[in-house]
Image (spheres, coloured by chain):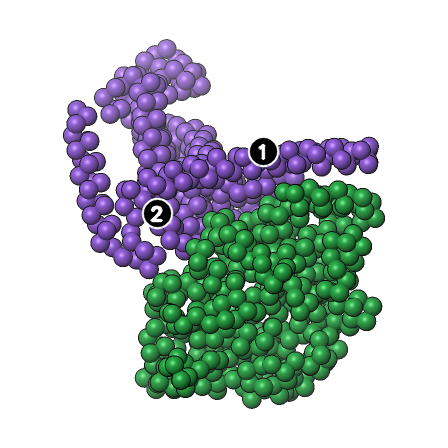
Chain colours: A green, B purple
Amino acid sequence: MALAASTFTVTSTTAEELGYPEKEELKFGFIKLTDMAPIAVAYENGYFEDEGLYVTIEAQANWKVLLNGVIDGSLDGAHMLAGQPIAATMGFGTKAHIITPFSMDLNGNGITVSNEIWKQMKPNIPKMADGRPVHPIKADALKPVVDKYIADGKPFNMGMVFPVSTHNYELRYWLAAGGIHPGYYAPHKGDSSGTIDAEALLSVTPPPQMPATLEAGTIYGYCVGEPWNQQAVFKGIGVPVITDYEIWKNNPEKVFGITAEFAEKYPNTTVRLTRALIRAAMWLDENNNANRPEAVKILSQPNYVGADYDVIANSMTGTFEYEKGDKREVPDFNVFFRYNATYPFYSDAIWYLSQMRRWGQISEDKSDDWYIDMAKSVYRPDIYTTAAKSLIAEKLADAKDFPNFDTETGFKPPQKEFIDGVVYDGTKPNAYIDSFKIGLKTGDKL
Amino acid sequence: MIALPLVGIAIFLILWSMAADRIDTSLGKFPGPSNVATQMSTLYDEHVAERVKAEAFYERQEKRNAARLEKDPTYEAKVRNYTGKETFFDQIITSLITVMSGFLLAAIIAIPLGIAIGLNKTLNTAINPIIQIFKPVSPLAWLPLVTMVVSALYVSQDPIVPKSFVNSMITVSLCCLWPMVINTSVGVASIDSDLVNVSRVLRLPALKHVQKIVIPASIPMIFTGMRLSLSVAWMVLIAAEMLAQNPGLGKFVWDEFQNGSSDSLSRIMTAVIVIGFIGFLLDRAMLQLQRLASWDKASAQ
């Protein structure tokens, strides 16, 4: 409270420069996942109110309902899968121009398999001196299991949360790196199941239902955000084999999405909500994650994520429990602010586009410029920069915690830390797409 | 008279807590009566805590409005509603309002329609097939259609009631329409011929005939239909709320299921008991109304 009161006086002195919000009553949607934390924190810590915004936060049933809510205006903004604004703007699935001024976090997902599959995978995994399996576990260990299912004529079913979800691409990335084909999409032929040529069949399940679906035996494994991997461990129904941090170190995860129309109509509101979210992200990572226990307490409230404190705390406070009792340090499991996590980099958007092309969601070749233009129409570092600069001017944030806005191009330097060793350079998407063993390449058309 | 139901309830509670102890789910043991009692008081505490937060919210808002007025005298201060979560008790109220609105809407359509069909054989023959076809349709099959139609037609910058409310309400209406129409029409059609003859002899105009003869005579059947409808409405509403995530008790249940917390099952069980209890009270209330309105006490038992 003391914090909220003191900042309130500060913001009001510069309110004229930023302008009052045009729309003050807002409704934001989210999915029950720990990475919605910046929204919950911005609300609970009064950052939205500091901006003169009266925000209602509402859990949504699944990603599709959430996206439709933003498009039809029943939601003003939402916690979104990074692929959602891109796919919507491109017209894959539903067509609507959605933008993002704020990237919500890095990492935070995991791939879990059922106990039965884990038992079959385990003999293929090298062990450390103390008998625990060596991490990261590659899909190579799963390959013989999948081959056996195929030989027996049984489909190998796995779950992900949405066709354009990070989880879909991460699961595909991991499987393909281990030689398991996750299947192609062919939207130009009306095929949106994504199972052409597939060895592992990936289907959509909303995040909170993943453990129940695994328990029911409908799927043998899944890729989902937290706390739904740790929940499988606590329930004793599955074993997380790898985190996305180990698939691609510090990969971009969720974004905050609003329609382009909203940003145009309510520019002050847009900057102000971005300011509130930046402050929440800073708070989440402050003093070496010192506020995380408090954040976990907020998230475990039934109106936010609602899972038990212990389950959420596992990943949020820098550890991750693989097999029951095998708890390991993953300090960057969920990054909300450091490493410029909140800055909407064009190169992040282009990575998603590259995977959409790789798996056929983009059915034809596009030029490098097309990828870059598409990224620029969705990712809006300009709004972010305005918000961040005003926070810096008010001494609510420190300029050294942000990218250098004068020189920032929106492209991260080539990234090397992928599980298969392929290097990603966002300025050359076509070259990147061609460098994969499994996946569509230049000239391929289904 | 009261002893036997009490014995029944006591035996049920014992059996329930014994069974609950033996069922292990992946979210812990199945909740027994004591868990439900604990949750009930937790839910009440949460409700109280939320009210305190709401008060603080309004206070902060007032200060903020005042500060802005000082800077910008042209500003018209608004009071915005509390933005925090709906508590369990708020959800109960929401569900009750929704079910009553849906039910009333259905009654307004169904009773006149039922009377018209009951009085007019030709109309009955024409409409009957439609009723027979729509009557068995599951309410939840209507829901997607209702949602889409409401989204398309109910467009307003500043809606008086939220879309989700309209969706739930119309779904409820669509389902509790039929028992009322059928019962009313049967009631009207089977009016004692002596009464009809009296009306003929007196040469009552059509409207007077309906008002003085038809309605009073068919009141018992109309209320039987309404009672049936209200129980259907309550069941349908909870299911619709769960499916569409519309605010109310159904959403509470679904949210808890999604939370997967170790308290979730107890909270769902608490909601189930409350839903049942409210359903029972609604039925009792209708029965009382029926007794009040009906001269034929025998039909209102």
| Badge 2: chain ID | B
Q: CA distance from mark 2 to mark 1?
A: 29 Å
The single residue placed furthest to the top in the displayed view is B202
Vertically, is B58 above or below A75? above
Tag in front: 2 or 1: 1
- Depth check: give the residue in front, B15 or A213: B15
Question: Within 10 angstroms of label 2, few (less than 14), some, or many (20 or more) residues?
Answer: many
Identified by mark 2, the residue type is Ser
Q: Secondary structure at mark 1?
A: helix
Residue A124 vs residue A216, the one in the foreground:
A124
Which quarter of the rendered picture does the N terminus of chain A lie within?
Answer: top right
User: Residue A129 at x, y = what percent?
Assistant: 40, 84
Residue B55: mark in rendering:
1
Is B96 situated left or right of A247 in this image? Answer: left
Q: Residue at x 55, y 82 (%)?
A: A419
Q: Give me the chain letter of mark 1.
A: B
Residue marked by disc 2: B266
Question: Circles 2 and 1: CB distance less than 8 Å?
Answer: no
Residue B218 in sight: no
Residue B268 vertical position relative to residue A132 in the rendered view, above or below? above
Q: Residue drawn 47% across and 68% down?
A: A320
- B100, above or below A367, in the image: above
**Residue A133 falls left or right of residue A72:** left
Residue displayed at 19% across by 44% down: B15
Quadrant for residue A24, please give it. top right
Q: Residues within 10 Å of mark 1 (few under 14, many from 20)?
A: few
| Residue B116 figure quarter | top left
